[in-house]
Amino acid sequence: MTAIVVGASSGLGRALAVELARSGKPLLLIASDARDLDALAGDLRLRFKGEVASLAMDLAASADPGAHILARLTDMSPPTALLLAVGMSRSDDDGTLGAGAIGQLLAINLHAPIAIAHALLPALLEAKGTIVGFGSIAGARGRSRNIVYAAAKRGLETFFESLRHRHPPSSLRVQFYRLGFLRSNLTFGLKLPLPIAEPEDVAGKVVAQLQQGSFDRYEPRWWGMIATVVRSLPWFAFRRMKD
Amino acid sequence: MSMRRGFALAETDLRSFDRRESAHCHVQKPDRYRLIEALPDDVQRISRGSGVSYIGASFADGCVVQDLSAFDRLLDFDAQSGLLTVEAGARIGDVVRFALAHGWLLPVAPGHPRASVGGCIAADVHGKNPARDGTFRQHVEAIELFDPSSGWLHLDRNHNAERFSACFAGFGIPGLIAQATLRLVPASAGYSLRSVAVASLVEAGEVLLAHAGAPLLYGWHDGRANRFGRGVVRFGLESKEPMTRRSRLAADLPATIKPWPWCAWNRTGIAAMNRLIGHRYGPGQVHVAIESAMFPLNDARAYYAGFGAEGFVEAQWLLPHARYADFVGSLEGEVARQRPRISLIASKLFDGQAQGFGFDGKGIALAIQLPQPKARTQAAFIASLTELALLHGGRPNLIKDSSLQADAAQRGIADFAACRERLRIFDPQGLQGSMLTRRLGL
C-alpha cells in the first residue's frame, strides 16, 4: 500500500507527495534534510489526514540507501509504488568538475536510484507494484553543459529499459518519464527557450498513470518531437547548438 | 551572484499592490530550508510572502528578495488547545479555512486572503475589530526566525522576548520569519451581520463605540463633499444557529490585479460605487459564513482594477477619541474646499496600546483611499490630510500609506527614534531593507 517518494522535499518530488497524499496512499518520504521532510509530512497529515512517514538520508553519502529504506519500512504497510524523483544538477557541470563533485552527481542521479530500486525490487514484485523513474531531456544527446548529469540520466534510462525488459507489466510496472524544463528552484528566473512545466501538472499525470502498465515517454509529450529533431541533427549542426 | 551555492536568482520588476512603488529586484525563491541559509551572510535582503502589501514592504532594488511562497505548509495542530503552527508563507485564507474546518477561528486576519502569516506578523496587521481582538501579535505564541549572523532562533514571550516583540510591525528587520505558532479561538457557526446607516463620521464613531464587543465592526463611508461621511457601520454578532444555506464564497482575490486601462474612479464612477455600496450593504441584517465576512476584499476585484495603472493610495490614521470629532470637522472642511476624489473611507475602532511602529492605540481609525494620487489636486489633498491628522494627534499606519514620508512618520509616532533603535539592534549591519524601510528611514 505504501508509496515511496525519493527526493520528496522540493519540486516534482514534493508535488508527487502532495498528489499521492491526496489520493489517500500511505507515504514514505525521503530527502536529505529532516526539516523539509518534517514540514511536508506535517502538512500532508493535517491536510489529507493520511499516514505519512519520513526518512532523512544523504543519498550522496550512503553506500546502501536501499537498506535504510527497507529498515524504515518495517513498521509500515508493504510498498506498492516507488517514485525516484531524486536528481541534482550543477551550473558548473561543464567538464571542469573534480572527482568529488562527479561522484556526488553520479551518486544522486544514478547510484542511489539504482541501489534503491534493487533493494525494493523483491517487495515491489510481490505487490505487483510500480517503479517510476525520471530522466531528462538533457540525456537526449551529449552536450558541453550538464555533462556528468546527462551521462547519469542516460545511464538511468538504460537501467529502466533493462527493468522493463526483464519484468513484464503483469509483475512490475516500470515507468520512465523524460522530463523537459520543469519549474524548480534552479530554473527560477532562467530565460528558457521553450515552455516550462509545472511540477504539480506533471505529478498529477504521473500519479494518474501509476496503474497503467510499463512505458517510457516524454513529459510533456511534445518534448518527444523536440528530442527526435535534436537526435536527428547532423553532427556539424548539433555542434553549433549551445542553448 | 554565483549560482554554485544551490540557488537561482531571478531579475524581475516588483510592484506594490497600490501600484505606487516598484523596483527592479533580484529574487530568490527557496524551496528548502538550506536554501534560506544559502544566501551569503553579507547580502542585503528582505523577506517576501505573497507580495500583497499595499506598499513596497517586501522588495527594494539592491536587496535580494527572499520569496517564501514555497514555505506555505501547515505544520502542526493541537485540536485541544487550538495551537496551529504554520510556515511563514502560509496564506491567511488557507489558515482561516483550515481553522474553520476544525471548529476554530483566527480572530485577526487582514482583508486580503493571500496575505502570508509572515507578512501579517511583520506588519502586525489588524482584523475586523481591533478594539475587541487587538492586532496580530495577540494571537502569535512563537516564531522561528532566521538571522544571517545568529542562525535559527526560537522566539516567544519567554525566550528572546524582545526580539519576539520586535517582529511585530518590525517590517522584516529582526530577521526572516520562517514559522509561527498561532493561537486560535473557538469559532461560531456564522455571523449575523447587521448594517446601521450613519449620516456622518462622528455618528459612525458613536455606533462603533456602542458595538465595541462585536467580532466584526467597521464602517464604509462616502468621501464626496456633499455626502461626506454618510455610509454604514457593519457589525457582526456570533450566530449560534448553524447556517441553513451555504452561501456562495467568492474566489480569493488574486495577489496581483490587472488594472483597467483607465481610472474608473472619476466623480461619476465614485458616485455609482457609493450607490452600489448603499444598495448592497444598506440597513438590515444578513446571515453570512465567517469566511466571507472575514475577506470582504474577495468581492473587490473590480474596485482595485478600476484604479487603473496609476494606482491608488490609502492613508490610514488612528485619531484619539478626544480629537476625533475635531479632526472629522476639519477634514470635512478640507474636502469641501479641495474636492478631492475619495473612492472610499473605512472606519474602525481601536482600544489597544501602541507598541513600536505598530498601528494600535485608543481611538478611531479612518482609512481614506484615493485614486490617481500623483494628480495635483489629489496630491495636495493627501498633504493636507497628513498635516491635519498630525495636528490632531493622529498615528499613521506605516504599512498602508505609500505617500507617507519620513518626517510625517516621525511626527506621528512620538518615540520614533527609540523604536528605530530598538529594531535595528537586531540588524546592526542594516542587511534587512525594503522600499518601506528606506522611505521612512527605519
Image (tube, coloured by chain):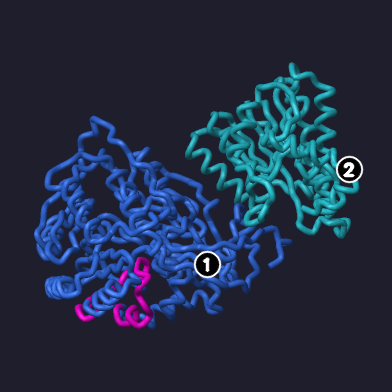
Q: At which x and y percent is residue A95?
A: 87, 56
Q: Which residue is mark 1?
A: B46
Residue type for callout 1 = Ile
Q: Nearer the viewer, residue A21 or A173?
A: A173
Q: Which chain is represented by cyan in the image? A: A
Residue A234 has which mark? 2
Q: Nearer the viewer, residue B299 or B210?
A: B299
Which residue: 70% across, 58% down?
B6
Q: Is residue B399 magenta?
A: yes
The mark tally for this picture is 2
Whether residue B323 is visible to the viewer of this picture, yes or no, is no
- Chain under disc 2: A
Q: Are marks 2 and 1 on the same chain?
A: no
Which residue: 18% across, 59% down?
B221
Q: Classify residue B228 as left or right of residue B120.
A: left
* Magenta highlight range: B389-412
Q: Nearer the viewer, residue B339 or B107?
A: B339
- Chain under disc 1: B
Q: Which chain is represented by blue in the image? A: B
Q: Quadrant of the N terminus of chain B?
A: bottom right
Residue type for callout 2 = Pro
For disc 2, the neighbor class at 10 Å (few under 14, some 14 to 19, many from 20) is: few
Residue B298 lies, with reference to residue A101, above or below; the image says: above
Q: At which x and y percent is residue B395?
A: 27, 74
Q: The residue tagged with tag 2: helix, strand or loop?
A: loop
Which residue: 20% across, 38% down?
B240
Which residue: 38% across, 49% down?
B253
Residue A188 has which mark? none
Whether residue B353 is visible to the viewer of this picture, yes or no, is yes
Question: Quadrant of residue A200 in the image?
Answer: top right
Q: At which x and y percent is residue A147?
A: 84, 51
Q: Is residue B73 magenta?
A: no
